[in-house]
Image: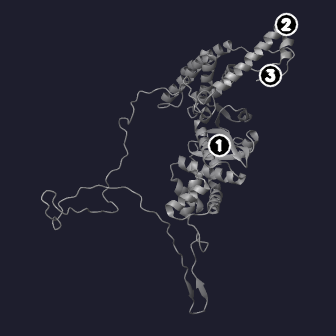
Amino acid sequence: MRIPTRDEIRAAYRQGEEAIIQLFDYLVWELQTLQDQLNKNSKNSSKPPSSDGLKKTPRTKSQRKPGNKKNGGQEGHVGHTLELVEEPDYIVVHAADKCDRCGATLVDVEAEDHQRRQVFDIPPVKIEITEHRAEIKTCPHCGRTNMASFPPDVTASVQYGSRIRAMAVYLNNYQFVPLERIGDFFEDIYDHRPSEAIILQANATCAENVKPANEAIKELLINAHVVNFDETGLRVEGKLNWLHVASTPNLTYYGVHPKRGKDAMDAMGILSEFGGVAVHDHWSPYFNYTDVIHALCNAHHLRDLTFVHEQYEQDWAEDISQCLLDIKKEVDQARLYTDKLDSDKIEEFEVCYDKIIAEGLERNPPPPKEPGKRGRVQQSPPKNLLDRLEGHKREVLAFMYDFDVPFDNNLAERDVRMMKLRQKISGTFRTAAGADVFCSIRGYISTVRKNGHHVLDAIQDALAGRPFIPSGCVGE
């Protein structure tokens, strides 16, 4: 905030009432801007929850509506508890040696029955060392010395097996365990500590071997009907880079680039080739792609509308929030038995939407342009939000016209959130190559997980040169 100097205040008084009013309006605007910044939190803006600190926000209400279900397990819920198994691995018999009442010996008395109790536990684990011996024989006919062949994956006199390397890749790229702590884990559990170089080498091998899988993922995303897009900051080599993600319920693809905008999106190579519905958060570079159908994240809109309603006390914001939630509810119910809303219902919702936006615009007219001042006139947050909701009505309501389009962009945000979690746990990437390796493996792991496959097995298969390749129907 820039505070006017004494000379500027005196000059306004000398110029008269109009100059004083302009100065007052400027101060009111600056004060409102500061209040807006102070009152924003993760519930009414795009700020992350970590930025809220310890301060509570009692005025903020969750967008989630209370349900009618009771607390605890619901009727028909299948519980998960330990049950006795018929064939335990080991049986330990505890003998009844004497009678509890008279003290007579029961050593030679045969047991009539047993009461069973079973303990589920993990036995001590140790690394197994398998020695491969290739026979050497001399031919009795020609005298040639012959040696048997080793298995293709046994290439050194001493080496780690694929399961240990897969476990290291799993811990580093899926559970986000830093390299030193991976060594601690192996030492504590297996009484053997691999070097950091071994872990990094396993990562590099896995990233190289999953390239065919990531190429297949990329091609499926390009040909998918609906894809979610998002981006977030990522520290690489001490500098701010940008992580970009493209995802569907079955596919995930990551890319890191020094820039955030169109250059990075072009380098990723998905949006530039994509022709379906792109779901995103209204960031302007996405609209550079004119061959796609755009759909906007309404979770962002609901937070922005909450802010306008709380900070500016404008009822239209709450009304349009309820309108969007009513449409979502109607779509969710209709999706159970049809693939589109009735045209009359669509028109009804459009009329409601347009009416509320008109009321908001009437409450927030465009600010007057000052004579002689060049450039775009700065607008209030309510007016900016109204312009977006009016100008991108089709994109805001895309989920109403096409049931394959989600109401929000939470899918991509969840995929991005895991990458941010990795950065919080393990810190920044020291090299760009390391960031690329991690993104390659993590996109593969995410896709494996989304398709219901065992992550550790999929990593081991990748290290063996047999990565999981998603089928052509996955991205549909």
Please name the residue that numbered disc 3 is placed on: 376
Q: Would you place residue 228 above or below residue 184 in this image?
A: above
Give the quarter of the figure containing the N terminus. Answer: top right
Q: CA distance from mark 1 to mark 2?
A: 56 Å
Quarter of the image for residue 314 reads top right
Q: Would you place residue 121 above or below residue 148 in this image?
A: above
Closest to the camera, between mark 2 and mark 3, is: 2
| Side of 51 where 189 appears, left or right | left
Q: Residue at x 80, y 22 (%)?
A: 376
Q: CA distance from mark 2 to mark 3?
A: 26 Å
Please name the residue that numbered disc 1 is placed on: 245
Residue 130: numbered disc: none
**N-terminal of the two: label 1 or label 2?**
2
Residue type highlighted by circle 3:
Arg
Percent coordinates x, y for residue 407 in the rendering: 57, 31
Percent coordinates x, y for residue 306 in the rendering: 59, 23
